[in-house]
């Protein structure tokens, strides 16, 4: 499609250069001849038959006729309606915008290595801490990391996040409160 569009652009650029030495009268005569040809083609095709344009032809027409005001477009004898041309131009702009705004990667960005190293260091130095406690310490340090991220880091390193946390100490009776 791009090759065809480039071909159309180059050939029509040469056609535009051919128009430079022509007088306004000659250009007007050519325009009238082209308009008459369009009318003959429309008459031969009939009302029910639609002319099919290739995508590169639509792009070229949209790019060529975009600079004209809508009022002028409506007066032109075109095989396609001006709204079709304008819709083609909107499609070009929408595709360009979508391409520019598309994220470079899909999904959530990876966790920063320094945070990953800090989580692993905290767990190594404090084996009794669970993933929630590590998350709380990171929050106290001013780092915004979700508890699920801490869980995932530990799981990826082969550390069971649930077993890191020790069970609460058993409740022992106070001395002197027992009856013997």
Image: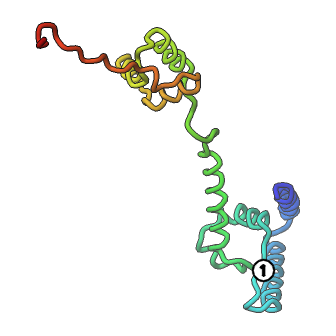
The image quarter in which residue 108 lies: top right
Residue 8 sits in quarter = bottom right
In percent of width and height, residue 120 lies at: 52, 16
Where residue 90 appears, as percent x and y from the top left, is 62, 62
Judging by the rendered image, the residue that carries numbered circle 1 is 51
- Residue at 75% across, 83% down: 50
Q: Quadrant of the N terminus?
A: bottom right
Horizontal and vertical percent position of residue 162: 45, 26
Asked if one can make out residue 137 in the rendered structure from this viewpoint, the answer is: yes
Q: Residue at x 80, y 74 (%)?
A: 25
Label count reads: 1
Furthest residue to the front? Answer: 180
Q: Quadrant of the C terminus?
A: top left
Horizontal relation, residue 99 to residue 142: left or right:
right
Q: Residue at x 65, y 51 (%)?
A: 96
Residue 153 to residue 72: above or below? above
User: Which secondary structure lies at badge 1?
Assistant: loop
Query: Is residue 142 among the parts visible in the rendering?
Result: no
Residue density around tag 1, few if under 14, some if 14–19, many if 20 or more, within 10 Å: few
Left or right of 116 in this view: 100:
right
């Amino acid at each position: 499609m791009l090759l065809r569009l480039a071909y159309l652009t180059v050939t029509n650029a040469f056609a535009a250069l051919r128009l430079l030495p022509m007088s306004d009268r000659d250009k007007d005569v050519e325009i009238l001849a082209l308009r008459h040809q369009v009318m003959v083609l429309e008459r031969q095709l009939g009302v029910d038959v639609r002319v099919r344009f290739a995508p590169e032809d639509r792009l070229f027409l949209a790019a060529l006729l975009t600079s004209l005001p809508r009022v002028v477009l409506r007066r032109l004898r075109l095989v396609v309606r001006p709204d079709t041309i304008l819709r083609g131009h909107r499609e070009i702009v929408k595709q360009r915008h979508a391409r520019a705004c598309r994220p470079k990667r899909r999904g959530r960005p990876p966790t920063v290595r320094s945070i990953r190293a800090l989580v692993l260091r905290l767990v190594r130095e404090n084996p009794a801490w669970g993933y929630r406690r590590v998350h709380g310490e990171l929050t106290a340090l001013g780092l915004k990391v979700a508890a699920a991220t801490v869980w995932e880091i530990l799981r990826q390193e082969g550390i069971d996040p649930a077993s890191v946390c020790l069970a609460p100490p058993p409740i022992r009776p106070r001395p002197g409160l027992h009856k013997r």
